[in-house]
Amino acid sequence: MASNGFIRSFKPLEFLTQDQMEQIHTGTLEVLEETGVTFVSEKALKLFEANDCMVDFENQRVRFPSWIVEDCIRKCLSSFHCKARIPEHDVRVGGNFVQFSTFAGMQSVDIDTWEPKPPTKKDFYDYMRVLDALENLHWLWAYPYYGFEGLPPVMCIPESVAGKIRNSTKFQLAANAQESDIFAIQMAQAVGIDIMGLLAVSPYTIKSGEVTGSR
């Protein structure tokens, strides 16, 4: 049983009324169905088309019927169990469970100059061991580092995942680039743990057939 973390015993803050939340939900459904979302992946477009979404292949735009969105929401679990390397570090995400994790930060700092610098492999491994020892840090985010110095860019995320598996018994979230999630899943399967993926959206501008923007 995953009990790692804290249980919230008080009512969460409510900034919006029920009517306001319903207005946001209704407006979101309208945007998804009428405006849609751009996907630059041919594979994704075909997958959406096979599952009853309205796909404009020429403009790479997907429109989601409201009933599909509502059906997906109903199927979402209110909480789910995540298996770590040892049962004591399993977590349950959602519900009334609250956990603490690391977050953003891409580089190390030179303690003499206070200038940012890429972490060494030793920096990375030592940091993961420190995080593993912190009693009230319940799982590891994709940050703080993507790999360490000396790695080719394509190996930064896989080496980060591997480094956390080697040096921590805690559950982790892994980032993804260039289909690196394939290797993260394989590593997790090899040691018998769960791993969480990160799904995010990005603003893009499409001009003259070229896609620009930030990830």
Image (cartoon, rainbow, N blue to C red):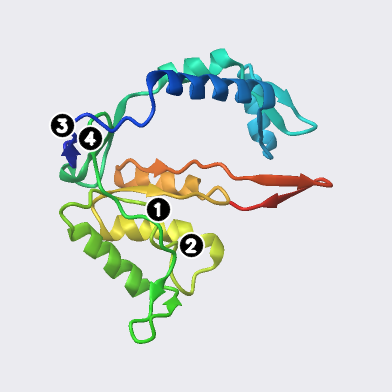
- Provide the residue designation for mark 3: 9
Asked whether residue 22 is in view, the answer is yes
Q: Earlier along the polypeptide chain: callout 2 or callout 4?
A: 4
The x and y percentages for residue 209 are 81, 45
Would you place residue 9 above or below residue 134 in this image? above
The quarter of the picture where residue 98 lies is: top left
Q: Earlier along the polypeptide chain: callout 1 or callout 2?
A: 1
The quarter of the picture where residue 16 lies is: top left
- Cα separation, mark 1 vs mark 2, equals 11 Å
- Provide the residue designation for mark 2: 156
- Please tell me whether mark 1 sits on a helix, a strand or a loop: loop
- Provide the residue designation for mark 4: 97
The tally of labels here is: 4
Would you place residue 203 above or below residue 75 in this image? below
Kindly give the residue lying farthest to the bottom in the view shown: 112
Q: The disc labelled 3 sits on which kind of residue? A: Ser
Q: Earlier along the polypeptide chain: callout 2 or callout 3?
A: 3
- Please tell me whether mark 4 sits on a helix, a strand or a loop: strand
Badge nearest the viewer, 3 or 1: 3
The x and y percentages for residue 73 are 45, 20
- Cα separation, mark 3 vs mark 1, equals 29 Å
Q: Earlier along the polypeptide chain: callout 4 or callout 1?
A: 4
- Please tell me whether mark 3 sits on a helix, a strand or a loop: loop
